[in-house]
């Protein structure tokens, strides 16, 4: 299954930072793949944070936007 815009929401926005939430019946690996969020590339910014509720796990990721939207674990 591909990215579904209806499953993405903004939890908070302030000073150019957005906290996102995405829930879908897909695995965390699928949702975390590079380019998965390219459909909303113009809405996301490097440094934004994304909470993912996947079918197999829940995770908090940081967003990086370049050629593709990528997500990575917070460290």
Image (cartoon, rainbow, N blue to C red):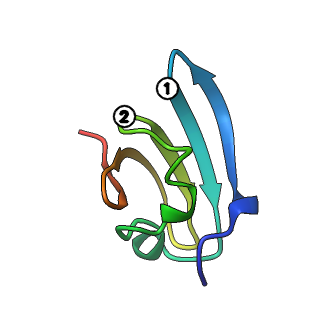
Where residue 3 appears, x then y in whole percent?
60, 71
Q: Would you say 51 lies left or right of 21 here?
A: left
Mark 1, other Cα within 10 Å: few <14 / some 14–19 / many ≥20: some
Q: Residue at x 56, y 63 (%)?
A: 39
In the rendered view, would you say 28 is above or below 73? below
Where residue 49 appears, x then y in whole percent?
45, 38
Where residue 4 appears, x then y in whole percent?
68, 69
SS at badge 2: loop
Q: Quadrant of the C terminus?
A: top left
In the rendered view, would you say 64 is above or below 28? above
As drawn, the label of residue 7 is: none
The residue positioned farthest toward the right in the image shown: 6
As drawn, the label of residue 47 is: 2
Tell me the residue that label 1 is attached to.
17
Q: Would you say 16 lies left or right of 55 here?
A: left
The residue positioned farthest toward the bottom in the image shown: 1
SS at badge 1: strand
Please name whichever residue, 69 or 21, is drawn nearer the observer in this view of the structure.
Answer: 69
Q: Residue at x 56, y 66 (%)?
A: 54
Mark 2, other Cα within 10 Å: few <14 / some 14–19 / many ≥20: some
């Amino acid at each position: 299954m591909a990215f579904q815009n209806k499953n993405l929401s903004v939890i908070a926005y302030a000073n150019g930072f957005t906290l996102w939430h995405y829930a879908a019946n897909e695995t965390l690996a699928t949702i975390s793949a590079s380019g998965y969020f390219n459909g909303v590339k113009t809405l996301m910014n490097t440094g934004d944070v994304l909470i993912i509720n996947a079918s197999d796990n829940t995770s908090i990721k940081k967003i990086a936007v370049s050629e593709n939207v990528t997500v990575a674990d917070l460290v």
